[in-house]
Image (tube, rainbow, N blue to C red):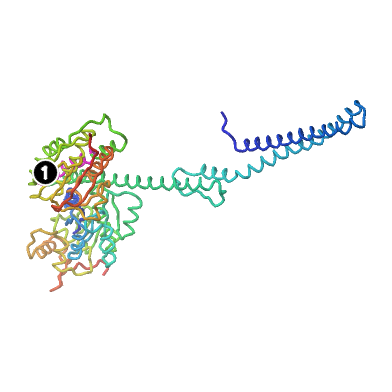
């Protein structure tokens, strides 16, 4: 799951990026509001971790602009400002959650997963389709109640497809949501992951829509 | 000793004056009557008859004067007591209003029913409440800022510690540990600066003022910071100027100049220059070839935690606040402007020693 970290402090920004990577996110990091605005315009992020007090374009101002332009990407404010007034202002400006620094990564990651879940209209934390169960928090997958070991990227591809069950995702979309900037990606990487997933899980789970992309059918459909 | 009471004093003065006036009227009436009676009676009556008649008249006069007074004085006293009391009721209401307030309630005092004599007092009280409110607001903002500034380095430490604990490779762990160490260093510097400022704010520094030679001070600070400038490929030049002595605390003046030069070195890109010098009359000057400061931002320099550059490059956000406070303790004047070389120019003007 790809997230954008907006943090002007270099030590903290790098730390948040590294910590989220360890928690299984693909995290991009930018240091100011203008860069964040550009990044959000160009890529498809599952969520944004936003600091306030950014240079060039203030965090709250960036948030207002995004919401004003109809951007629905879940935004979690990560700020050292803990005053009630600041938290209320942040949420009212369009943020979906507010976490005060210092924080624990377990909580930050869980909140991000919850935001993404809500943004996709899901209530249950575990995703289910064709006998496959995926738990985003524990990052585990089971098929017919038997645990299946998946490499990180295969898990990410499956997670995106199951989260968007019933919708076709193109190779480019999947690639954009699974890999962060600057990662070396083979042109057929997504196809290879899907191939492996089909071999390890229910063969009918992931459908190919020729010329368009891949699809996991909705459970109830 | 009991406080003077307005009510008692008014009562005393009015009753006393009334009694005195009455007494004067009585005495003068008595003397007049006695004089007239003597002339009249002595012509027509015998001596003893005349005395008897006179005494009767005086007695009657005395009674007619004393009884009204005896009756009027208590009535007057009661009227004054009640009148003053009701006149002072707005003051009592004001007192009740203030007594019921919580210490954080700094709203203006209700003054619609206050008499004209007391209105200026209430207006002044409200102005004072307003000023206290502003000060509190500023303090609250400052506390929020300080909390933010302290939490950020803590967040760096906590974040990098968590990353290091979970690192799966040695390089990732070392990277996180390096960042952890850098974060700890930054937190230490911030706390040091906060303590310095807090000590400076809490009053006069210890020790007596001494004569400080500004050229020697500039030399000392330039020598101290030269290695850092060199490391950043910045030329640190000393412009000595005329010998100048000012009266001050040598330690604090060193901190002042070190902060100015440190700031200049920090914000000047590699390849640039920083000039430190003394000018007549009794002025320290630090200029740099850095990016300078937009004119609109110049007046905000020295505000606590106000940073121009993105965090991280910047220091604690307190350096210039410390400079301003030390200058204030020395009666010196700090000016920020943009140097002809393009960067920031800071001057500190002292009163020279003769």
Residue A47: x, y in percent? 23, 59
Magenta stretch, main secondary structure class:
helix
The residue lying at 37 percent from left, 45 percent from top is: B135
Q: Toward the viewer: A176 or B230?
A: B230
**From which residue to which does the magenta span run?**
B170-192
Question: Along the line of sight, which residue is nearer the eye, A213 or B309?
Answer: B309
Question: Few, some or many C-alpha atoms within 10 Å of disc 1 (few <14, some 14-19, many ≥20)?
Answer: few
The location of residue B100, given as percent across then percent down, is 52, 43
Q: Which residue is mark 1?
A: B174
Q: Is residue B136 above or below residue A213?
A: above
**Magenta stretch: includes residue A163:** no
On the picture, is B290 further left or further right than B296? left
Across and down, in percent, residue B120 comes to 51, 47
Measured along the vertical axis of the image, is residue A193 above or below residue B352? below
The residue lying furthest to the top in this view is B48
> Which residue shows up at 65% across the image and 35% down it?
B12
Q: Describe the element under mark 1 as helix, strand or loop.
A: helix
Q: Nearer the viewer, residue A147 or B319?
A: B319
Write down the quadrant of residue B351 in the picture.
top left
Q: Residue at x 60, y 43 (%)?
A: B88
When the figure is inspected, residue B218 is found, relative to residue B106, above or below; the finding is above
Query: The disc numbered 1 marks a residue on which chain?
Result: B
Q: Is residue B237 left or right of residue B143?
A: left
Rendered-image quadrant of the C terminus of chain A: bottom left
Report if residue A210 is visible in the image.
no
The percent coordinates of residue B32 (x first, y second) are: 80, 34
Residue B39 appears in view: yes
Q: Is residue B23 above or below residue A134?
A: above
For this orientation, the residue located farthest to the bottom is: A211
- Specify whether B103 is left or right of A11: right
| Residue B182 among magenta residues | yes
């Amino acid at each position: 799951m790809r997230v954008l970290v907006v943090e002007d402090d270099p030590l903290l920004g790098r730390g948040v990026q590294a910590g989220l990577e360890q928690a299984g996110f693909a995290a991009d990091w930018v240091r100011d509001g203008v860069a964040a605005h550009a990044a959000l315009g160009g890529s498809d992020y599952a969520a944004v971790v936003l600091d306030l007090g950014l240079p060039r374009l203030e965090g709250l101002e960036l948030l207002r602009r995004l919401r004003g332009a109809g951007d629905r990407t879940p935004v979690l404010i990560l700020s050292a400002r803990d005053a009630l007034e600041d938290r209320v202002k942040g949420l009212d400006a369009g943020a979906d959650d507010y976490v005060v620094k210092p924080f624990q990564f377990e909580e930050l990651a869980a909140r991000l997963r919850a935001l993404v879940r809500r943004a996709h209209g899901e209530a249950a934390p575990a995703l289910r389709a064709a006998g496959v169960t995926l738990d985003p928090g524990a990052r585990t997958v089971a098929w017919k109640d038997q645990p299946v070991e998946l490499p990180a990227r295969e898990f990410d591809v499956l997670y995106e497809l199951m989260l968007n069950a019933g919708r076709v995702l193109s190779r480019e979309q999947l690639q954009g949501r699974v890999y962060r900037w600057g990662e070396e990606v083979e042109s057929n990487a997504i196809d290879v992951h899907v191939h492996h997933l089909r071999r390890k899980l229910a063969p009918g789970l992931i459908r190919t829509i020729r010329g368009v992309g891949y699809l996991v059918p909705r459970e109830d459909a | 000793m009991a406080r003077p009471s307005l009510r008692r004093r008014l009562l005393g003065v009015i009753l006393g004056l009334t009694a005195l006036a009455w007494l004067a009227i009585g005495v003068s009436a008595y003397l007049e009557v006695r004089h007239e009676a003597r002339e009249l009676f002595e012509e027509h009556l015998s001596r003893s008859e005349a005395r008897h008649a006179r005494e009767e008249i005086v007695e009657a006069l005395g009674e007619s004067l004393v009884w009204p007074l005896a009756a009027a004085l208590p009535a007057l006293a009661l009227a004054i007591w009640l009148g003053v009391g009701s006149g002072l009721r707005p003051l009592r209401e004001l007192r009740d209003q203030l007594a019921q307030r919580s210490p954080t309630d700094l709203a203006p005092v209700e003054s619609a029913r206050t008499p004209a004599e007391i209105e200026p007092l209430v207006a002044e009280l409200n102005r004072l409440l307003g000023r206290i409110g502003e000060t509190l607001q500023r303090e609250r903002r400052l506390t929020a800022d300080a909390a933010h500034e302290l939490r950020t380095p803590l967040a760096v430490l906590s974040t990098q510690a968590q990353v290091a604990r979970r690192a799966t490779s040695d390089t990732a762990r070392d990277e996180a540990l390096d960042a952890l160490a850098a974060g700890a260093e930054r937190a230490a510097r911030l706390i040091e600066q906060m303590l310095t400022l807090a000590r400076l704010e809490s009053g006069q520094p210890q020790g007596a003022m001494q004569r400080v030679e500004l050229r020697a001070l500039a030399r000392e600070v330039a020598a101290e910071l030269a290695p850092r400038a060199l490391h950043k490929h910045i030329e640190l030049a000393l412009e000595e100027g005329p010998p100048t002595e000012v009266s001050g605390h040598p330690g604090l003046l060193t901190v002042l100049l070190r902060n100015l030069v440190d700031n200049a070195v920090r914000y000047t890109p590699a390849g640039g220059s920083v000039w430190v010098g003394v000018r007549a009359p009794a002025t320290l000057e630090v200029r740099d070839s850095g990016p300078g400061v937009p004119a609109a931002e110049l007046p905000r320099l020295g505000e606590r935690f106000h940073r121009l550059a993105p965090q991280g490059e910047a220091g604690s956000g307190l350096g210039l606040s410390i400079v301003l406070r030390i200058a204030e303790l020395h009666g010196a004047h700090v000016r920020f402007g943009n140097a002809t070389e393009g960067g920031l120019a800071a001057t500190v003007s002292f009163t020279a020693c003769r």
